[in-house]
Amino acid sequence: MRYLRKFIRTYQGFLAPIILGPLSLILVLFGIYPAATRTYDLFNDVASEQEAVNQLRQKIANLESMDEQTLEDQLVLSTSSIPTDKNVPSLFSTVETISSNVGTTMVDLTLTSLGSLATASAGRQIEDKTFGAFLMPFTVQVTGTYEQMKVFLDQAVNVRRLLRVRTFSLNFLGEEARMQVQFDALHAPLPTNLGRVDAMIQPLTQKEEDILARLNNQQNYSRVLLEGFVPTISDSLKTDPFAP
Amino acid sequence: MASQDINLLKTKTSLSPQVVAVQGQLKMGSYVAIAIVIVIGVLVGVSYSLLNFQLGRIENQKKTLIAQLNTLSRKEGLYVSLKQRLPIVEKALGGQRLWGSVLQTLNSVAVPPELTSVAIDDKNVMVLTLQTNSIETTASMVNAVITLARDRKIRSPQLVALQLLEDGAVQLSISFLPAI
């Protein structure tokens, strides 16, 4: 005991370093370092959230600069060229009007691979992945003169309801020509999801405006209505504005 | 004479001066270390608090902006639908061909009644079927096809079939790719 007290008395000056040194090390390892790491992560979170806020502001500014009626008119224009569903009546009216305008006689119109008229059903739908749309093939037979056939073919690809000539065969019997044309009509549904809330929105490009101008200049022999347009939003923070 | 010092405790350390010096330095070092740790800890704590406060403020801003964006969702829906549709329209327009105009350029080859049929398949290969009354007329038609190929209005012309009929008529089929 006497030696212990002597030892403590002799080396009492080392007590502070012995306690404070390891204590500092422990504080750094288990306190400062985790706190600094968490603070750095928080700094990154603040930066990314600020970026998201800036993007949202820009998105809102871009949306507010667009006129809703103009957008709706443009969408109706684009859906009149590629409808949201098969819209068989508009197909009939388009082809029939072309034939009538040109002066040919439409002998036959056959829809192939129609499937169900209700596009929402799981009927046969041919998707063309190069277009990103569904195809509805149909065949038209017309009679008339050779010149009328040429005009018919050119007009068929110059109307608002976009048609693609897949094949045709033209046979002549004296003055009369008889033509069978295989067309593809396109349709594509509207999106049901707006995507992420922070997805950016840019005004239409000049190329897109030119496409709309070209569609606007084409003859519209069909009437397509924008019905049932109810988009939903994927981000959980956004609520469905159309919900009751 | 007896010593006046009755203090039995030794006041003087038995450590050497070097050890005492080291002891002093270690003591100073430990005080400095703990002070630095405390200062850094306070700085980190203050930074964390400030950043946390800022994050809360930014998150509130974000909620406000999202609520504002909700009021524009119909407009956004129209825009997204339009943007999604336009590339399809562009591809469809790009894939259209003015076949009537192509047939017009073939007038230099033949017209009805010499031209008996025209067909095009889904690979855009056009086949003309012609019927003439003489070899000379047939030759001029073939020359016309060659001229079109030379003028790059058609590509890869091929004589598919040639038949000489009993009455001297010639029937031939020519295929080619229109340059469109």
Image (cartoon, coloured by chain):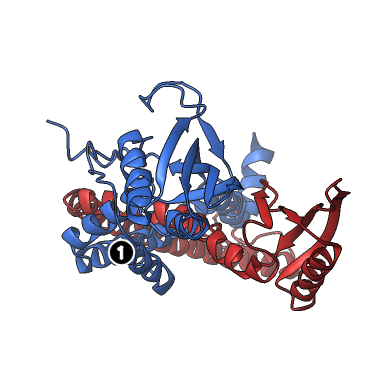
Q: Is residue A49 left or right of residue A37?
A: left
Give the residue number, with chain letter if any, for mark 1. A216
Where on the picture, by quarter, is residue B16?
bottom right
> Horizontally, is B125 left or right of A115 in the view?
right
Q: x, y percentage for residue B9?
A: 58, 52
Residue A57 or A163: which is nearer the viewer? A163
Residue plotted at (84% across, 58% down) = B158
As displayed, is residue A122 above or below residue B133?
above
Q: Identify the residue shown where x is 54% and y is 49%.
A: A165
Residue at (59, 59) in percent of width and height: B11
- Nearer to the camera, A180 or B163: B163
Residue A12 horizontal side relative to residue B131, left or right: left
Left or right: A1 in relation to B46: right
The quarter in which the N terminus of chain A is drawn is top right
In the rendered view, tell whether residue B78 sits above or below residue A112. Answer: below
Query: Badge 1: few (under 14), some or many (20 or more) residues near its Cα, within 10 Å?
Result: some
The residue sitting at the left extreme is A244
Chain letter for mark 1, please: A
Rendered shade, chain B: red
The residue nearer to you, when weighing B75 against A162, is A162
In the foreground, A7 or B58: B58
Q: Position of residue A62 (x, y in %)?
A: 27, 67
